Image (tube, rainbow, N blue to C red):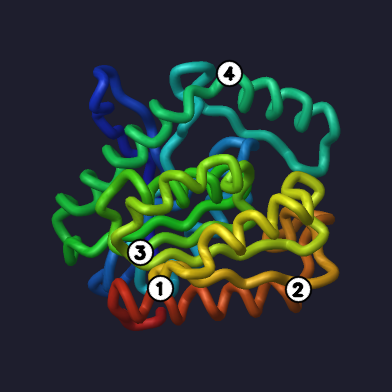
C-alpha cells in the first residue's frame, strides 16, 4: 500500500487536498471516506489505510478547505472538540456534498479505477454519506452514527443505491426519539439496512480513541466490508 496527498478540482472553482491510499493490488473499487468533524486527522488516515489493505482505492477529502485547510484535530483533547464544533457550524453542507461528488468523479477517473465507487462516513461524514445516497450516483454508501438524518428523511425517496446506517444505541448526538424516527422513516425502503448497536455511544468505531468499543466496531466493520464487497466488488486482501 502507498499513500499520497492529491489535489481535487472543486465543481464550484478552486481546489482542495485529499489523502489517497492506494492498495498494492489492482483496486476492486474506490471509496470516498468522509471525515468526522475533526478533519482529515490520523484516525481518518489509519481508517483509509485499513480499507486500502482490503483492496480499495480510498480518498479522504478535506471538507474544511474553504474555512481552514489542513485541519487535524485530536479526539482526546477537549479544546480540539470546541474548535471542531465551530468548524461544523460554519461548514456549508451543500458545498460539502458537491466536494464529495467531485471526489467521487476523481476516483472514477483514476487510472487504476474499476469505475465502481462508494462512500463511507463517520459522524458528520455519516450524515454526508446519507446525502451521497440521496444526492449522488455513488454505487453504495455506509453511514456510521450519522447526525441529523432524522431531519432529512424527505430526501429518502431519492435513494437509488444500497445504504447502510450503523447507529449507536447510546449516541449522545442522535437521541432515542431521533433514532426511532429514522427507523420508522426508512423501514419500508428495500435499499436501506439499519444496524443498531446496544450499549455503545457515538464514535464507537473511532480507532485509537476512548470512544472505541472493539466488539461493536469489529461487527460493524465486518458488515461494512461484506456490503462493500457485495456492491462494489472484492479485491485481493494484502
Pointers 3 and 2 in contact (C-beta within 8 Å): no
Q: Nearer the viewer, residue 179 or 164?
A: 179
Tell how many labels: 4
Please name which of the two marks, 2 or 1, marks the residue nearer to the observer: 1
Q: Work out which quarter of the rendered image holds the C terminus and state it.
A: bottom left
Q: Which residue is mark 4?
A: 90
In this view, the residue in front, 28 or 191, is 191
Mark before the other along the chain sequence, 4 or 1:
4
Q: CA distance from mark 2 to mark 1?
A: 29 Å
State the CA–CA distance, disc 1 to disc 3.
13 Å
The residue that disc 2 covers is: 214
Q: Please name which of the two marks, 4 or 2, marks the residue nearer to the observer.
A: 4
Image disc number at residue 190:
1
Q: Nearer the viewer, mark 4 or mark 1?
A: 1
Task: Pick whichever, 169 or 14, lies toward us.
Answer: 169
Mark closer to the chain start, 1 or 3: 3
Q: Is residue 35 above or below residue 116?
A: above
Q: Earlier along the polypeptide chain: callout 4 or callout 3?
A: 4
Distance, label 3 to label 2, CA atoms, is 25 Å
Circle 4 crowding by C-alpha within 10 Å: few under 14, some 14–19, many from 20: few
How many residues crowd mark 1 within 10 Å: few (<14), some (14–19), many (20+)?
A: few
Q: Earlier in the sequence, mark 2 or mark 1?
A: 1
Marks 3 and 2, the one that precedes in the sequence:
3
Residue in the picture at 30% in, 72% down: 232
Residue 179 position, x and y percent, is 69, 57
Amino acid at each position: 500500500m502507498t499513500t499520497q496527498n492529491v489535489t481535487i478540482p472543486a465543481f464550484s472553482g478552486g481546489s482542495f487536498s485529499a489523502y489517497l491510499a492506494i492498495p498494492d493490488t489492482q483496486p476492486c473499487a474506490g471509496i470516498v471516506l468522509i471525515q468526522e468533524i475533526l478533519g482529515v486527522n490520523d484516525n481518518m488516515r489509519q481508517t483509509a489505510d485499513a480499507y486500502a489493505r482490503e483492496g480499495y482505492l480510498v480518498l479522504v477529502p478535506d471538507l474544511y478547505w474553504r474555512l481552514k485547510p489542513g485541519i487535524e484535530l485530536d479526539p482526546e483533547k477537549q479544546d480540539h472538540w470546541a474548535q471542531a464544533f465551530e468548524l461544523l457550524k460554519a461548514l456549508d453542507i451543500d458545498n460539502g456534498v458537491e466536494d464529495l461528488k467531485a471526489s467521487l468523479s476523481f476516483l472514477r477517473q483514476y487510472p487504476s479505477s474499476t469505475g465502481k465507487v462508494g462512500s463511507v462516513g463517520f459522524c458528520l461524514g455519516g450524515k454526508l454519506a446519507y446525502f451521497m445516497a440521496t444526492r449522488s450516483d455513488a454505487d453504495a454508501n455506509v453511514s456510521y452514527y450519522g447526525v441529523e438524518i432524522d431531519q432529512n428523511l424527505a430526501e429518502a425517496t431519492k435513494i437509488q443505491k444500497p445504504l447502510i446506517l450503523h447507529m449507536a444505541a447510546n449516541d449522545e448526538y442522535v437521541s432515542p426519539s431521533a433514532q426511532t424516527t429514522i427507523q420508522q422513516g426508512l423501514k419500508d425502503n428495500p435499499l436501506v439496512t439499519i444496524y443498531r448497536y446496544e450499549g455503545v455511544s457515538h464514535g464507537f468505531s473511532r480507532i485509537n480513541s476512548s470512544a472505541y468499543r472493539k466488539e461493536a466496531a469489529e461487527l460493524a466493520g465486518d458488515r461494512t466490508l461484506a456490503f462493500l464487497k457485495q456492491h462494489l466488488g472484492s479485491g485481493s486482501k494484502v
